[in-house]
Amino acid sequence: MAKIPDKQEISQLQQRLQSRTDYSISILLWGLFLFSFISVWAVGALDPINAGFQMAVQLAPLFIFFPLFATIGMVSDRVLVQDKLNLAKKSGSKGTVTKNQNKWQLNKEDCIRIILISIVLFISLPWMVARLGLSHVLFFQPVHLGEHHGWIGAYILLSIILISKTEKLYSKSIFKEGSIYLLCFLIFWGSGLLFEDFAKEQLNISFPFLVLDIFTLDQLGILAIQITIITILSFLIYYFGWRKYYKKKIE
């Protein structure tokens, strides 16, 4: 039998339904997806090898994952919250809620997010302009037009930074814990894609990260080691960073 929420939890659940932050994040993520899809499609007229409609369609499942992740998570969590409130209502429990507690307000965490987003966007300038039909920008080395795995890494990181704003709002569930671990894993993978591409194209140095779309079969062992290392690091960040520190902090 489901646990009936107490008055404090009822108030928190009511505040959760008042929040519009998750709506805003979902809209931003869908906008990021449209930019990634339409830009590489359009620039295909200039470089059909690395861009175009076919390339955009091939990468669409990867890019659409994050807006879908945020949207489905938002909807399912709101349904869960409403079910809990209905259960409390049937039992006669009530809570008090302070209005407008969950409006998007700029706080210390948001300042860190803005700094991180700015760094990722700065590193991503060559790939962003490559999607707009230009081969170079500012003092960066010129790159080919169209899609780059460095942008895929940047897209992953930008999406996770935005999602981190709403993930903590969600009610306790095994799906929430699983999704947070998945995001920890993708942080490392996205960082690897970004820094490998930037180091190779802009600094002419080798960054030790194996990119899936260019590896050979004899590198399967290296790929397995890479996945193992990232899996372990992701668990450490999830367990100590989330469960042992941040989760307790926000609770």
Image: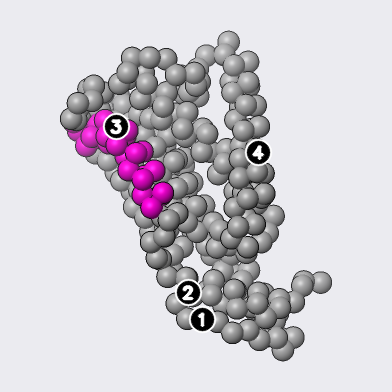
Indicate the quadrant where residue 250 lies: bottom right
Mark in front: 3 vs 1: 1
SS class of the residue under badge 1? loop
The kind of residue on which mark 3 rests is Trp
**In this figure, which residue is indicated by the disc labeled 4?**
235
The kind of residue on which mark 4 rests is Phe
Indicate the quadrant where residue 48 lies: top left
Q: Which mark is residue 134?
A: none
Q: Position of residue 126 (x, y in %)?
A: 26, 30
Q: Position of residue 4 (x, y in %)?
A: 74, 77
Label 2 Cα crowd, 10 Å radius (few <14 / some 14-19 / many 20+): few
Estimate the spatial distance between the alpha carbons at disc 3 and disc 4, rounded to whole Å: 31 Å
Q: Which mark is residue 101?
A: 2
The magenta stretch spans residue 117: yes
SS class of the residue under badge 3? helix
Camera-side residue of 11 and 155:
11
Residue depicted at x 29% and y 32%? 127
Residue depicted at x 45% and y 77%? 100
**Looking at the image, is 30 positioned above or below residue 221?**
below
**In this figure, which residue is indicated by the disc labeled 1?**
98
Indicate the quadrant where residue 154 lies: top left
Camera-side residue of 39 and 136:
136
Does any portion of residue 68 appear in the rendered image? no
The kind of residue on which mark 2 rests is Gln
Quarter containing the N terminus: bottom right
Q: Which mark is residue 127?
A: 3
The kind of residue on which mark 1 rests is Thr
